[in-house]
Image (cartoon, coloured by chain):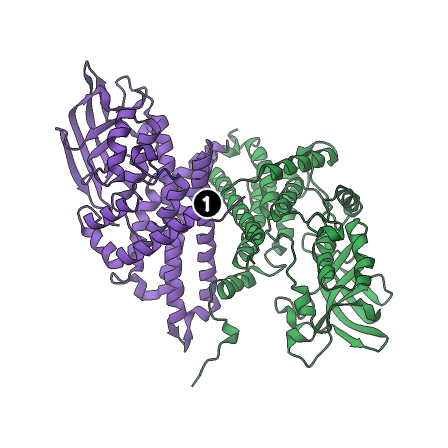
Amino acid sequence: MRYEFSKEDEDFRQELRSWIRDEIPGEFKDWQGVDEAADGFEYGLEIRRKLAKKGWLTMAWPKEYGGQGASYMKQVIFNEEMSYHRMPGRDGFGAKMLGPTLMVHGTEEQKKRFLPPIANGEVQWCQGYSEPDSGSDLASLKLKVEDKGDHWLVNGTKVWTSMAHKASWIFFLGRTDPDAPKHKGISFFLANIKDANIQVKPIINMAGSHHFNQVIFEDVKIPKDALIGELNKGWYIAATLLDFERSGVEYPATARRNFEEIVDLVKNTKDSLGVPLIQDPYINKTLVDLDLDIEAARLVAYEVAYLQSQGEVPSIEGSVAKILGTQLSQKVAKIGTDFAGLYGQLSDSSAPFDGKYLKQQLTVTAYTIFAGTTEIQKNIIATRGLGLPREDKLKVNSK
Amino acid sequence: MDLGLSEIQKMLQESSRAFLEENCPMDFIRAMESDEIGITDEIWNNIAEMGWLGLMIPEEYGGSGFNFDDMSILLEEMGRVGLSGPFFSTAITGVQTLLLSGTEEQKKEILPKIATGQIKISLAFNEKTGSFDESEISNTTSIKNNEGWTLNGEKLFVNDANSADYFIVAASTENQEGTSLFLVPKDTEGIEIQKMESIGGEKIYKVNFQEIKLESSQIIGEEGEGWNTLHKVFNYGASGKSSEMSGAAAKVMDMTLDYIKDRKQFDRPIGSFQAVQHHAADMAILTKVSTQFSRKASWKLTNTDDADLDVNRSKAYVSKAFHDVCQISHQLHGAIGYTWDYDLQVLTRKMQHQKLAFGDSNFHNKKISDKLDL
């Protein structure tokens, strides 16, 4: 048992932290971060290239691919500090998902062509998994990919595709065998999203932001070598266990920064009698509860990374971390809005934080839905973790 | 970061689970609820022989010199089976008080006998309000005289007063400006004890100290400095109760899983229904987080000087979480879990003491608020 990071890891944290604080334009405490899916995209890419030069963008990659083979705990620290400081530049799709998938399943040519631009922070990828009729039941996806001899022909629609409007490439799952059982007729492909027959249509979320899109493939021809790995093995390729921490530590790290900022304002805001709001026992208690929730999510995130570092596959812990982290994001956004009385409904400069947390409240509604809803995560905990029988697999003798 | 157990901790976990499951099954725990002491001589002697009582006592005083985080693994296991009895009073709060502030003579005299099971200790701190701040000590006084002190006052919520050989009594100094701790043999003239009925079978007493003559050798630590010691002892207490509760939560979880996998309605195990599964997942989350909080607190207490906040967080979270776990478990057990004969309710009743001892959620929430300067 040791609930502290090693000296080496803490040294890395300090090095990273001082680099980040130098990079942040202006004062750290005023820094609000940027929206990388909107006008902060270019700035995010700039930081990404700097992270690449520092060797941090792909530090989790094996050394043979130019990475450092960094430990899970070091990755946790990296994500914790980046999130806490609201730094853009990380590359979830390219460096974290596609890169490692290519290392395991790609041909030499595919690796040579696609890995260096990811490692150098030069390319934005997006991920085409969900479809209009395939959300939680992803394996039911229908996007049709036909073998036309010298090319693949793609027809269908992807949806909720984050960053598609900023990306130059998309990796996606398509149905290559409509007659096989649903998990066994899916393949994994790459496509240049700028193809004339691919249409990217914005979907504006309820916060008024453009983060995700509909991606429509209409008779899109992609080359034969756009297939990654074996035909009809795409479901398993997409689920390849990658040597990346998946602790979800970014949720509590982000929340801790927001917590500190909210506490600061609550201390400096007075009620109608001139008493600082922090002295309101209900507000005070709400903040203590929030501290506990942040700490809970952080402890479980560390546990996920620890289990990964031991070569174990965290199943229940990963789901617990996702549930706690995303619920936490929603709590913070609500608390950051609700203490201010009627001002909590405003989005102008008289609102607390200029309405930032109000907007965030709308944005983070998606968190408990994306990447496996809370309900799906609980199903995973119950069936894979606790060994309870799956309702849909049960054979019942009904009389 | 190493969230696994050390070899010693693993060994302790395995051996204690094996011993407790075999020797302290639920019918034993139930019998101990109405037993005067709460443990049999046989089990107490076994516990001493296995080195549990002296686990944290340094070798020079006859113990095995392990740490509190090792002890916390043992406490998880005791929580699992629901064993209360005088162990906690003696081996946790008693030992820690003496280790922190006892004189060399006191340590030499008492610690070896604790390790062998000959001596039991009980901490007499609480008074009328049942809180864990220094202001709780309002009517117990120690008036200095030529030979030592005269002690007067009434203590409430004194655990295991009946079986104790010594009390550690917290009293205010004559000028009311501090707290002193005294080691008082139970057979001292002027001590009267009276039982308080606890719902979970804990042995809780009112203890009246009337005109107790104390010699100068009976003080633990410096006069008026007792609170510094008590504050640390309460951290061990709160952390230890968190460990018990996280162990008990894991047991409640196991009982519930067994039940919902087995119990059939509508021709299928009720554990196959998502409504039930999601309750089970919630229990798993609460249990997992409780274990992390309590282990982190015990590690911090063992290895650092700034464990306060983590202890507060642990006791605040786990006290609430374990209550929730019990509540969900009862919901999933349906009517059967509500009966006296079914074992689940034994742990539910014991929970009430565990979550209140050394500060409930409200108490620790307030401390967190102070520590974070909210």
Dot 1: chain letter: B
Q: Pinpoint residue B269: horizontal percent, then vertical percent.
A: 41, 72
Q: Is residue A57 left or right of residue A5?
A: right
Is there any visible trace of residue B338 in the rendered image? yes
> Between A285 and B194, which is closer to the camera in this rendering?
B194
Q: Pinpoint residue A31: horizontal percent, then vertical percent.
A: 69, 36
Q: Is residue B189 left or right of residue A121?
A: left
In the displayed structure, A324 sits above or below B96; it is below
> Between A287 and B148, which is closer to the camera in this rendering?
B148
Per the image, label 1 sits on a secondary structure element best described as: helix
Q: Which chain is green?
A: A
The residue at the point 36 percent across, 47 percent down is: B74
* Residue placed furthest toward the top: B146
Is there any visible trace of residue B359 in the rendered image? no
* Residue placed furthest toward the left: B189
Q: Pinpoint residue A216: horizontal percent, then vertical percent.
A: 78, 67
In the displayed structure, B169 sits above or below A161; it is above
The residue at the point 47 percent across, 40 percent down is: A285
Identify the residue position indicated by label 1 in the image: B293
> Between A107 and A129, which is closer to the camera in this rendering?
A107
The residue at the point 58 percent across, 41 percent down is: A256
Tag 1: Cα neighbours inside 10 Å, few (<14), some, or many (≥20)?
A: many
- Asked which quadrant contains residue A241, the reply is bottom right
- Asked which quadrant contains residue A399, the reply is bottom left
